[in-house]
């Protein structure tokens, strides 16, 4: 039986989130160790109450922990090293009561010259970088929604610029072009970075050459509505006190026609209580 609630105004209302949860590693001890942080990550996700959330840096065990602890969510993703379980995931959690995943419209591609080759990295980055994408079908309205989640390189700007072009091409090549698009991720780049500006329709130079602005640019939800709590949009904090002027490198971009209803950065003041070295971002949006 279809129990998904129907929107009284006929719009597709969504709460979206992006959260770099920080990998589980032997170098992370004390309050930074995953067994200590996991409850905080879960509490943070529950506090945002997203319909769809993209997580970055999650290893297989971390994805399994979250999935087991959130039975009301389904999951899609794979490790970046082999396309199976090895390496970090850029995974997508979504409410199973709201959405059905279109298994004919999903995949993982690598940010490289050989995007279908697992583990490939040809743009100067030391680690493989990926995009996980899927089409979700709203059970109530039967309308589709494309979700892309990515984690860009932390050092190599040419890699980020080439990543932006490839992702834009893949979004344009989607089968159902009239359906909404959501792009989530840790771009390791602020809003003024050329690779990010490219998505929002900026006239920029990528890889040293001018490129045509996108015909269907995306909208940065935080450019439409600032989150409460002041002008600072810092998301990467590295378990240190906040720094004035640090940019937001975690992003939620949405396609044309979206109404941005609210935005937020889920911050924790006390350093020892922060469940990751990033603050997650969230937004409430709707489409006709």
Image (cartoon, grey):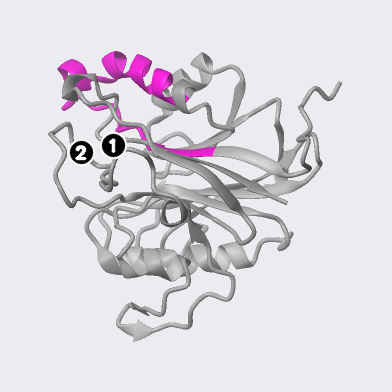
Q: Is residue 56 above or below residue 214?
A: above
Cβ–Cβ under 8 Å for marks 2 and 1: yes
Q: Which residues are magenta?
A: 16-45
Which residue is found at the position 42% from the left and 51% from the top? Answer: 222
Pointer 1: what residue? 278
Pointer 2: what residue? 237
Which of the 4 image quadrants contains residue 55? top left
Instruction: Judge left or right: residue 193 versus residue 201.
Output: left
Whether residue 270 can be seen here: yes
Image quarter (top left, top right, bottom left or bottom right) of the N terminus: top right
Which residue is found at the position 19% from the left and 17% from the top? Answer: 31
Instruction: Judge left or right: residue 114 versus residue 250.
Output: right
Q: Is residue 63 above or below residue 203?
A: above
Crowding near the residue tagged with mark 2, few <14, some 14–19, many ≥20 C-alpha atoms within 10 Å: some
Q: Is residue 129 above or below residue 84?
A: below
- The dot on residue 157 is none
Q: How much space separates mark 2 and mark 1, taking CA atoms?
A: 6 Å
Instruction: Judge left or right: residue 175 versus residue 205.
Output: right
Instruction: Judge left or right: residue 151 versus residue 33.
Output: right
Q: Secondary structure at mark 1?
A: loop
Question: In the image, residue 198 lies at what x, y percent?
Answer: 42, 70
């Amino acid at each position: 039986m279809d129990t998904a609630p129907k929107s009284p105004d006929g719009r597709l209302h969504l709460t979206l989130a992006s959260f770099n949860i920080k990998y589980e590693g032997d170098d992370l001890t004390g309050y930074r160790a995953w067994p200590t942080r996991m409850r905080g990550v879960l509490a943070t996700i529950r506090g945002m109450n997203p319909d769809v959330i993209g997580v970055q840096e999650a290893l297989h065990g971390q994805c399994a922990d979250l999935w087991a602890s959130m039975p009301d969510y389904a999951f899609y993703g794979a490790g970046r090293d082999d396309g199976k379980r090895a390496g970090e995931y850029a995974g997508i959690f979504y409410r199973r009561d709201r959405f059905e995943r279109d298994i004919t419209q999903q995949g993982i591609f690598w940010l490289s010259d050989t995007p279908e080759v697992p583990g490939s990295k040809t743009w100067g980055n030391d680690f493989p970088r990926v995009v996980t994408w899927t089409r979700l079908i709203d059970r109530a309205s039967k309308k589709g929604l494309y979700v892309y989640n990515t984690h860009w390189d932390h050092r190599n700007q040419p890699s980020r610029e080439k990543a932006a072009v490839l992702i834009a091409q893949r979004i344009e090549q989607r089968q159902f072009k009239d359906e909404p698009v959501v792009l989530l991720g840790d771009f390791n780049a602020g809003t003024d970075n050329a690779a990010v500006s490219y998505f929002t329709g900026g006239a920029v130079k990528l890889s040293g050459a001018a490129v045509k602005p996108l015909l269907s640019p995306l909208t940065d939800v935080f450019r439409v509505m600032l989150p409460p709590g002041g002008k600072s949009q810092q998301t990467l904090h590295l378990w240190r006190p906040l720094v004035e002027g640090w940019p937001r490198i975690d992003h939620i971009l949405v396609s044309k026609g979206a109404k941005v209803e609210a935005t937020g950065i889920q911050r924790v003041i006390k350093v020892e209580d922060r469940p990751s070295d990033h603050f997650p971002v969230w937004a409430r949006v709707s489409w006709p």
